[in-house]
Image (spheres, grey):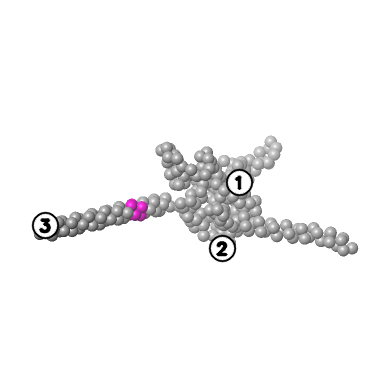
């Protein structure tokens, strides 16, 4: 009797354990977990770049004024005419053909930038500098083969997987926006109002401004030049001090010689 009761309870207990593990996995997978210098993307960053890429896909096809005829049979009266911009085909192509989250793999990690701006397409300034040194014949060692320098980083690969998760979980919301709310901002509709908590939306306001990056680079260069000039000045002052000490010793010796002669 006791064993039968326990067996009947096993599936319930197992289900609760699995549910607990599933919740724990979702919470940790989107967290900013830092280990060995690796900072995983936040849920805000993932949602932000998902919307950026999906909106880009839709903008690419938004100018198409093609009319699609749906239905079967030869009789044209039985076929419906649908604007491609509001068709199922356009949505399917934008999300799944190929999957929109594959575009995330085109991003690189720009460690010189802050916040969500660390994820961007193109080679980072750091990698540009390192490649430039190699081109000049300088030996640079990063602990990995040169062929893997531009490979997908752990952070970007993780962001791509989490992007897949958001698309699966909020596909109904994406369809609702597409068919009935295209006049609303997709970033607000999906990320602010549905996916993210109110205390996890800071990255949505972060925008990359190239001019600011140039100014920061110029400031860094100025600081470096100032440090170099200060070092040079210190060296010169030390040399001058040594020179003055040398002249005073010579003067003392001359004075001693004069005394001896007298």
The residue identified by callout 3 is: 261
Residue bearing mark 2: 198
Q: Quadrant of the C terminus?
A: bottom left
Q: Dot 2: few (<14), some (14–19), or many (≥20) neighbours within 10 Å?
A: few
Name the residue carrying label 1: 95
At 80% from the left and 59% from the top, the residue drawn is: 10
Q: Nearer the viewer, residue 176 or 221?
A: 221
Quadrant in the rendering for residue 26: bottom right
- 157 part of magenta stretch: no
Residue furthest toward the top? Answer: 74
Q: Which residues make up the magenta segment?
A: 223-228
Badge 1 marks a residue whose secondary structure is helix
Report the disc number at residue 154. Answer: none
Percent x, y of residue 175: 62, 51
Examine the rendered structure and indicate whether residue 77 appears above or below residue 228: above
Q: Quadrant of the N terminus?
A: bottom right
Q: CA distance from mark 3 to mark 2?
A: 94 Å
- Where is residue 168? Give x, y as percent: 65, 51
Q: Name the residue at 49% across, 57% down.
A: 205
Camera sees residue 51: no
């Amino acid at each position: 009797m006791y064993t039968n009761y326990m067996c009947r309870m096993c599936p319930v207990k197992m289900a609760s354990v699995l549910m607990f593990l599933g919740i724990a996995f979702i919470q940790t997978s989107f967290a900013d977990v830092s280990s060995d210098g690796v900072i995983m993307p936040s849920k805000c960053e993932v949602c932000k770049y998902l919307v950026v890429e999906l909106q880009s896909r839709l903008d690419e096809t938004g100018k198409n004024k093609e009319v699609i005829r749906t239905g079967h049979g030869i009789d044209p009266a039985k076929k419906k005419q649908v604007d491609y911009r509001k068709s199922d085909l356009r949505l399917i192509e934008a999300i799944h053909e190929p999957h929109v989250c594959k575009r995330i793999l085109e991003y690189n990690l720009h460690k010189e930038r802050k916040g969500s701006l660390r994820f961007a397409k193109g080679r980072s300034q750091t990698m540009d500098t390192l490649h430039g040194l190699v081109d000049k014949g300088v030996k640079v060692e990063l602990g990995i083969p040169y062929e893997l320098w531009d490979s997908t980083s752990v952070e970007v690969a993780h962001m791509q997987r989490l992007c897949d998760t958001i698309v699966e979980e909020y596909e109904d919301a994406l369809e609702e926006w597409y068919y009935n709310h295209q006049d609303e901002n997709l970033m607000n509709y999906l990320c602010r109002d549905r996916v993210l908590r109110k205390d996890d939306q800071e990255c949505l306001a972060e925008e990359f401004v190239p001019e600011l990056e140039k100014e920061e680079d110029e400031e860094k260069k100025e600081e470096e030049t100032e440090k170099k000039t200060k070092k040079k000045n210190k060296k010169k002052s030390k040399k001058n001090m040594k020179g003055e000490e040398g002249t005073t010793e010579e003067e003392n010796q001359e004075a001693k010689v004069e005394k001896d002669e007298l």
